[in-house]
Image (cartoon, rainbow, N blue to C red):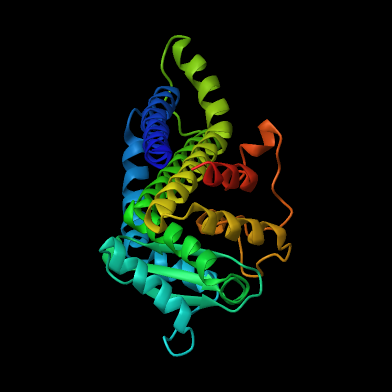
Amino acid sequence: MFIYSQISSNKTKTWLIIILFVLFIPTVVYIYGQATGYGLTIVGIALVLSGLTSLGSYYYSDKLILTMSSAKKASKSEYPQFYRVVENLCIATGMPMPNFYVINDLSPNAFATGRDPKHAVICATTGILEKLNKTELEGVMAHELSHIKNYDIRLMSIVVILVGLVAILADLFLRSLWFGGQRRRSGSAQGIFLLIGIVLALLSPIIATLIKLAVSRKREFLADASGALVTRYPEGLASALEKIALDKQPLKSANNATAHLFIENPFRGKDVHNWFTGLFNTHPPVEERIRILRSM
């Protein structure tokens, strides 16, 4: 069945990208250490800083994201269809019920966050609840529940932390050069590593961000396929994505830190379709997502 092959393909591609990330960081660390003569000292400092940040992010990132998005806790009496749709899907998949939040905004969009299925949140805009019919809303919610079930919410938190670690390492390296703190060693090897290190310090945060965005795009494809498997009706999500894409009203509370979480790019009109600039998109082209869903 095409849905299963799509899920398998996207899982494989995602883990290949993660492996690339894991190999990329030690390479950067080694070059910085050789260039400064401090070996792994700067790595130890970076790991302590990132460890503290990671611990806070693990437990409180969902609350921060909801605050940044101006989301409010939703009651069952106020949004009965929202609750019923998610409740039915949770029963079908055997998942615990998430917490429900709503953003008061006419732009149709939704996202999931949290650290695991037992501590998950599904957030929808008032626009998506008003503009989609029940079948389309089921498609969107199945997509978001798939993010939770596939632990995408945790994976993306880890990737964001790794991107932050790369940025911290680059900053520490450049600061050590600025303040003249590198240890001098004989030979030309350090000079070569120094030159490579400067180039990497400038480029590595961009490369890390590109990897993060690539992971984000692959997880969207995976959630599309997984969500279609739950509802057994890919057309529901395809139709919902079509409506969301046609609505050109941007989400007022959207920002670059949370944009990758939403089911579709919340910055309307900023999707690009050429190969190079497409690398910086938080989401795959909606036309491609719809085409794949309708071919299932």
Image coordinates of residue 256 in percent, x first then y, are 59, 56
| Residue 26 placement, left or right of 95 | right
- In the displayed structure, would residue 223 be above or below residue 135? above
Quarter of the image where the N terminus is located = top left
Q: Nearest the camera: 2 or 286?
A: 2
Q: Determine whether, in the image, residue 270 is placed left or right of residue 39.
A: right
Would you say residue 179 is visible in this rendering? no
Q: Nearer the viewer, residue 53 or 101?
A: 101
Of residues 47 and 89, which is closer to you in this image?
89
Viewer-nearest residue: 291 or 189: 291
Residue, far top: 187
206 lies above or below 194: below
- Kindly indicate the quadrant of the structure image that contains residue 29: top left
Q: Residue at x 44, y 9 (%)?
A: 187
Q: Write the residue at 33% across / 35% down.
A: 41
Q: Give left or right: position of 246 versus 76.
A: right
Q: How many marks?
A: 0
Against 254, residue 203 (above or below) is: above
The structure residue drawn at horizontal position 37% and vertical position 43%, both measured from the top left corner, is 46
On the rendered structure, is 66 left or right of 276? left
Q: Position of residue 73 (x, y in %)?
A: 44, 81
Q: Quadrant of residue 266?
A: bottom right
Rendering coords of residue 96 (x, y %): 27, 69
Task: Name the residue rendered at 70%, 39% in the picture.
Answer: 273
